[in-house]
Image: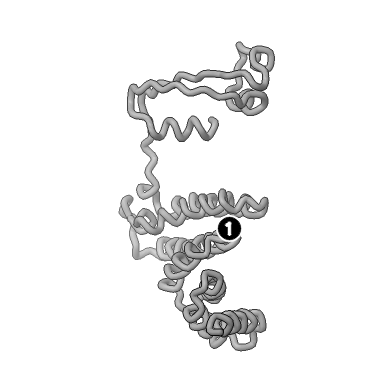
Amino acid sequence: MPSILQKLLKSMKKNMVVSMTTTRIKDKLHSNFVSDWLNQYEAFKEGDTVKFTVTLFGIDNTSYFYKNKAAEKLGILQKLKATAGEFFKLGHYTKAAKVYQKANGYFNFGDVANNWSREDESTEEFKSTMDELNTLKLTCFTNLVVCKFKLKEYQSVIAITEQILDMAPSHAKALFFRGKSQYLVEEFEQSIATLTKLCQLQPDNTDFKAELDMANKLKARELK
């Protein structure tokens, strides 16, 4: 289904009737609305205006993430991570970020932690799965940071890395992108503090030292 119709349906109420028009025909229309009784290539040509009338008769959706067992939640989130990873490889950073944000939402709003199915939390299997979910949480948050940095959304990077550092105070990747983003938005003192901590954690890393030097240079330039 075309994304525009998905967005339309999400905004509709039961029994509502909505009409929309489009001029985007050709392959997009044909692939989204395959028909055995209508040859759309003959009926429409590029540039024609097509009107859709949509009626929402009802919604049949009983699948709620929080109701899944821990192993099922892990599987769903691993698929989301894989999808986001494919978008990232193609350079589609905005799409990748949206998928990571969806995954992160399940963590942030308590859906992952919600043991609705009342699994035995004392079993080794349950504990192991929850450990995997916690590791995946950190990975998804960190990957979202990389996407946001690629998109030059530096304030978002700073906000997300704060959450990561609450979970893992010595997370090198989070500190790196946080410090770099801070000096890119001219928060030089904060950047120096962040990158100093990073260099103390990994004193032999020349890349980290170079970023700290850059922050100090930019701070000195500001003072001139």
- Characterize the local packing of mark 1: few (<14), some (14-19) or many (20 or more) Cα atoms within 10 angstroms: some
For the residue pair 79 and 162, the one nearer the viewer reads as: 162
204 is higher (above) or lower (below) than 52: below
Q: Secondary structure at mark 1?
A: loop
The reply to whether residue 117 is visible in this rendering is: yes
Q: Residue at x 52, y 22 (%)?
A: 21
Q: For the residue marked with disc 1, what is the amino acid?
A: Leu
x and y percent of residue 175 in the render?
52, 75
Q: Does residue 106 appear to the left or right of 183 in the view shown?
A: left
Q: Residue at x 60, y 54 (%)?
A: 85
Q: Quadrant of the C terminus?
A: bottom right
The residue wearing badge 1 is 151
222 is higher (above) or lower (below) than 99: below
Q: Residue at x 34, y 62 (%)?
A: 121
The quadrant holding residue 70 is bottom left
The reply to whether residue 132 is visible in this rendering is: no
Q: Residue at x 53, y 75 (%)?
A: 179
x and y percent of residue 92 in the render?
62, 50
x and y percent of residue 142 in the render?
52, 65
The quadrant holding residue 210 is bottom right
